[in-house]
Image (cartoon, rainbow, N blue to C red):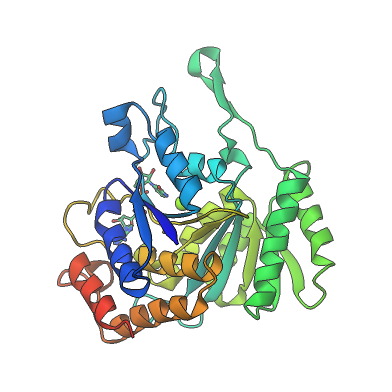
């Protein structure tokens, strides 16, 4: 069993080691290789995602990814490493569960799963400017093939996890050729899963209900951009971004990667919450390595630590535990 670890930038260097500790404790035979990516890597090597890192990820077939800092303006030669890596490894499904955890910041009863298409939509990176930079255009691509496979993933997972309903979230009223296609294909696929209820919401209405009544959602099936935004919203109900896990899943490779980014506002202080990345590792163990008993043990240890009131400062405020102290608590609770 092999794992490629990419810490990335910022708090990636602080939270990823906690997940590595947990995995080493439970899977002593795990072989770990390290790859570089991110803004610091770009500044030092001229590449945000070196070919060597892609090769390591493909070879290991399992990746633990922290987060990379990406500037919000164009930098020649730079593109978001995680978006590139998802493409390079064909991890076409991004699974983002929000299950309320035993913390005061969580909303009781929320238990939903965002299934986000991970390879197309506006994130294909086909963006250009004309008119001396005063007009920008980006291509939104939706294909039948990608919509079909992500819809199957959503319905299959709904069935596996004993969930009742899949809600297709789109903006087909304004974008009938793209989101309309996604919606149509999702409904076609839904006919193969008669035991699962299917309904739909326009993305703006979905955002409204996500804030007002998050417990009404079960599985959300949605294109890339809406999935990115709605999963951060959902994370607020799970207790915060520091607790929100995710898994990028393909047929060959899986990338465990928390929903949060590199958090430059707290990076270097040793206070980031490692829960999101530890729970992402548990998703990798469950859905990619197919070892549910080990995934259960990781999740139980996190629950036990939080249930004791062991909190980092994103949950507690000022006097929270450090990243390492909370990682110790998780490891002590591993049975
Ligand atoms: P962010 O998720 O890094 O931070 C948002 C807020 O949540 C901040 O206040 C941060 O301190 C807090 N937060 C996030 N994770 C936390 C944790 N584990 N423990 C405690 N608090 C936590 O989002 P932001 O600030 O919008 O983006 C920062 C950088 O991260 C940007 O350069 C962005 O491009 C990048 N990013 C990278 C991602 C990736 O590589 N997968 C995903 C999202 C953002
Ligand atoms: Mg995001």
Where residue 308 sits: x, y (%)?
Answer: 26, 87
Q: Residue furthest front?
A: 29
Residue 242 x/y as whole percent? 34, 64
| Viewport quadrant of the C terminus | bottom left
Relative placement, left or right, of 2 versus 129 is left
- Say if residue 100 shows up in the picture: no
> What's the residue at 55%, 14% (across, down)?
131
Residue 105 vertical placement versus 190 (above, below): below
Vertical position of residue 248 compared to residue 161: above or below = above
Which of 208/54 is in front? 54
Residue 156 in percent (x, y) is at 70, 69
Residue 9 falls in which quadrant of the image?
A: top left
Name the residue located 38 percent from the left edge and 72 percent from the top edge: 239
> In the visual, does 317 lie left or right of 163?
left
The residue drawn where x is 39% and y is 56% is: 260
Can you say which quadrant of the picture contains the N terminus?
A: bottom left
Q: Is residue 310 left or right of residue 24?
A: left
Please state the horizontal and vertical placement of residue 231, each as a whole percent of the image. Answer: 51, 60
The image quarter containing residue 167 is bottom right
Q: Is residue 134 visible?
A: yes
Residue at 37 percent of width and 71 percent of height: 27
**Closer to the camera in the image, 138 or 253:** 253
Query: Would residue 152 appear left or right of 70 to someone viewing this image?
Result: right
Camera-side residue: 35 or 270? 35
């Amino acid at each position: 069993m092999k794992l490629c670890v990419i810490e990335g930038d910022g708090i990636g260097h602080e939270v990823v080691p906690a997940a590595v500790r947990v995995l080493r404790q439970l899977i002593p035979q795990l072989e770990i290789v390290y790859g570089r990516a991110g803004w610091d890597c770009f500044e030092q090597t001229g590449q945000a995602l070196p070919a060597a890192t892609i090769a390591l990820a493909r070879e290991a077939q399992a990746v633990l990814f922290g987060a990379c800092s990406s500037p919000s303006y164009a930098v020649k030669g730079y593109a978001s490493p995680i978006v590139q890596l998802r493409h390079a490894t064909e991890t076409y499904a991004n699974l983002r569960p929000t299950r309320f955890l035993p913390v005061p910041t969580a909303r009781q009863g929320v238990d939903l799963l965002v299934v986000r298409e991970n390879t197309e939509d506006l994130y294909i990176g086909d963006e250009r400017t004309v008119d001396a930079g005063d007009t920008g255009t980006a291509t939104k691509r939706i294909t039948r093939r990608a919509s079909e496979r992500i819809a199957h993933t959503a319905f299959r997972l709904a069935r596996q996890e004993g969930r009742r309903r899949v809600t297709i979230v789109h903006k087909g009223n304004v974008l009938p050729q793209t989101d309309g296609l996604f919606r149509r294909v999702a409904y076609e696929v839904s006919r193969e899963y008669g035991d699962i209820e299917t309904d739909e919401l326009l993305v703006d209405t979905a955002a409204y209900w996500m804030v007002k009544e998050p417990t009404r959602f079960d599985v959300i099936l949605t294109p890339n951009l809406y999935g990115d935004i709605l999963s951060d919203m959902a994370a607020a109900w799970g207790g915060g971004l520091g607790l929100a896990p995710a898994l990028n899943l393909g047929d060959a490779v899986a990338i465990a990667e928390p929903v949060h980014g590199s958090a430059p506002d707290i990076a270097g202080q040793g206070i980031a919450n490692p829960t999101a990345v530890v729970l992402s590792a548990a998703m990798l163990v469950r859905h990619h390595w197919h070892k549910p008993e080990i995934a259960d043990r990781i999740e139980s240890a996190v629950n036990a630590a939080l249930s004791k009131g062991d909190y980092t400062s994103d949950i507690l405020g000022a006097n929270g535990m450090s990243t390492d102290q909370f990682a110790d608590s998780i490891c002590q609770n591993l049975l």
